[in-house]
Every structure is written in structure tokens, then in C-alpha cells.
């Protein structure tokens, strides 16, 4: 007598296929957090205990796997910017945004790389990234208008913050988080308007964008 097929779930996948999909996603989350998003797909398949063909059947491209793995983090990052922009205290919103994004960078090595990588086919992701970039500009403008952020601060300086924080992120998570919090606190103090000295101006800003941070990550 033949056995009935395993029932499909709400996504239309059979139970065994759903199980494999979840194993792949969990393995990818762990691998990306530890090693970054360039870890070989075959290594993810081994970690998940599935064949490479099974992995590619579920996720035909690295892009599709990365965007699925980091969907929640992208949403959390977008909420961070939304909350910061909604804060009536412009400086607090600016400060909290930097603190939270730097903490995300330390906890998950793959997240920053995923956020900075151009995925032209991932429409929702590209929209969120563009919104975040606009949010950075608006948060900077608001903090300056409130008289709390020094006038010579440039949006490109936020890339410097992330580049500096990236070096800390390579250590054990607890130690890295503590070090990151202290570094960010020092930098935020330096960014405040009462630390700007007209008699001792800053050097011109480096022409840095988020793409420079991505290039630094892959070196």
C-alpha cells in the first residue's frame, strides 16, 4: 500500500521541504554572522546537513539566500531609522540611530555587508537601503538645525564611524559590544557642537560613501 504524501504547509511546501529550508536558513544565519556573506554556498549546505543541489533548489542564488536571511534585520534597521526620525529630540534620535546601527554591526558580521551590497533584483531591499540613506541625511540635518551637531559634520563621517566600529566587531561579541559602546560614546561627544573649535578646524571631509565601507569589508 502506498503512503500518502506529506501534507503541504501554508507556503505550499511539503513538510520535509520546509524542514530543509529552515535548516538552510539557520545554517546561513550562523555562517553569515561568523564569517560574513561571502562564505561558500557549499559550506552552508554542509552546515545545514543538506546537499548543494537541495540548497540551490530552495535558494537559486546567493542574493536570494542573503535577502531571506537578513529580512528581519533589514526590517529592524528600517525601524531604527523611523524611530530616530520620529523622536522629537533631534540629537537623541541621531545618537540612538548611531548606537543601534553600530551594535547591529558588532553582533552580526554579515549584516553590514548584506546592507551595503547592491542587489538590483531585490526591489524591497533596495528600497529599504535607499530609505536608510535618506534617513541618515535627514537625521544629520535635524541634529544640526537643533544646534546640537557641529556644523562641520558631514554624512560621510558616519561611514568613518562604521569603518572604525568594524575593527572592533572582529572580537568576541560581549567584549566587542562593550568596546563599541565606549568608542561610539567618545565619537558622539566629539560630534557635539560644543566640541567644535573655530580656531582649530577639521581637515576637509574624506569623500566616503557606504560603498567605501563595503570595499573595506572585502579586503
Image (tube, rainbow, N blue to C red):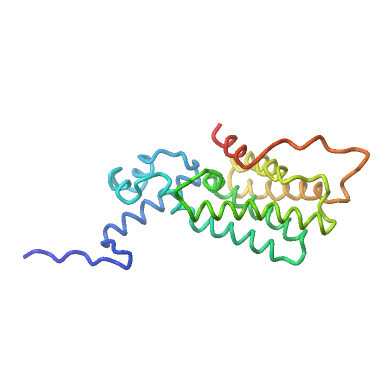
The x and y percentages for residue 20 are 31, 54
Tell me: residue 79, above or below residue 126.
Answer: below
Q: Is residue 102 left or right of residue 60?
A: right
Dividing the image into 4 quarters, which one contains the N terminus? Answer: bottom left
The x and y percentages for residue 36 are 50, 42
The x and y percentages for residue 100 are 65, 55
The x and y percentages for residue 138 are 71, 55
Q: Is residue 187 left or right of residue 27?
A: right
In front: 164, or 157? 157
**Residue at the left extreme, as displayed:** 1
**Residue at the top extreme, as displayed:** 219
**Residue at the right extreme, as displayed:** 199
Dividing the image into 4 quarters, which one contains the C terminus? Answer: top right
User: Count of labels shown?
Assistant: 0
**Residue 144 placement: quadrant:** bottom right
Q: Residue at x 32, y 68 (%)?
A: 10
Q: Residue at x 90, y 38 (%)?
A: 200
Q: Residue at x 61, y 50 (%)?
A: 174
Tell me: residue 86, above or below residue 194.
Answer: below
Amino acid at each position: 500500500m502506498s503512503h500518502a504524501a506529506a501534507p503541504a504547509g501554508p507556503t505550499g511546501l511539503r513538510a520535509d521541504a520546509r524542514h530543509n529550508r529552515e535548516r538552510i536558513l539557520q545554517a546561513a544565519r550562523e555562517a553569515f554572522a561568523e564569517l560574513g556573506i561571502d562564505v561558500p554556498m557549499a559550506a552552508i549546505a554542509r552546515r545545514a546537513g543538506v546537499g548543494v543541489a537541495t540548497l540551490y533548489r530552495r535558494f537559486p542564488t546567493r542574493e536570494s539566500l542573503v535577502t531571506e536571511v537578513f529580512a528581519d534585520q533589514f526590517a529592524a534597521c528600517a525601524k531604527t531609522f523611523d524611530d530616530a526620525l520620529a523622536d522629537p529630540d533631534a540629537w537623541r534620535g541621531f545618537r540612538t540611530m548611531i548606537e543601534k546601527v553600530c551594535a547591529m554591526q558588532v553582533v552580526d558580521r554579515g549584516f553590514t555587508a548584506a546592507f551595503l551590497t547592491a542587489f538590483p533584483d531585490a526591489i524591497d531591499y533596495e528600497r529599504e537601503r535607499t530609505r536608510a540613506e535618506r534617513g541618515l541625511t535627514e537625521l544629520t540635518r535635524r541634529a544640526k538645525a537643533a544646534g546640537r551637531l557641529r556644523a562641520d559634520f558631514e554624512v560621510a563621517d558616519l561611514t568613518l564611524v562604521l569603518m572604525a566600529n568594524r575593527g572592533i566587531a572582529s572580537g568576541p561579541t560581549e567584549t566587542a559590544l562593550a568596546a563599541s559602546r565606549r568608542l561610539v560614546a567618545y565619537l558622539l561627544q566629539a560630534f557635539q557642537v560644543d566640541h567644535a573649535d573655530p580656531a582649530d578646524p577639521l581637515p576637509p571631509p574624506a569623500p566616503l560613501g557606504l560603498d567605501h565601507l563595503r570595499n573595506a569589508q572585502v579586503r
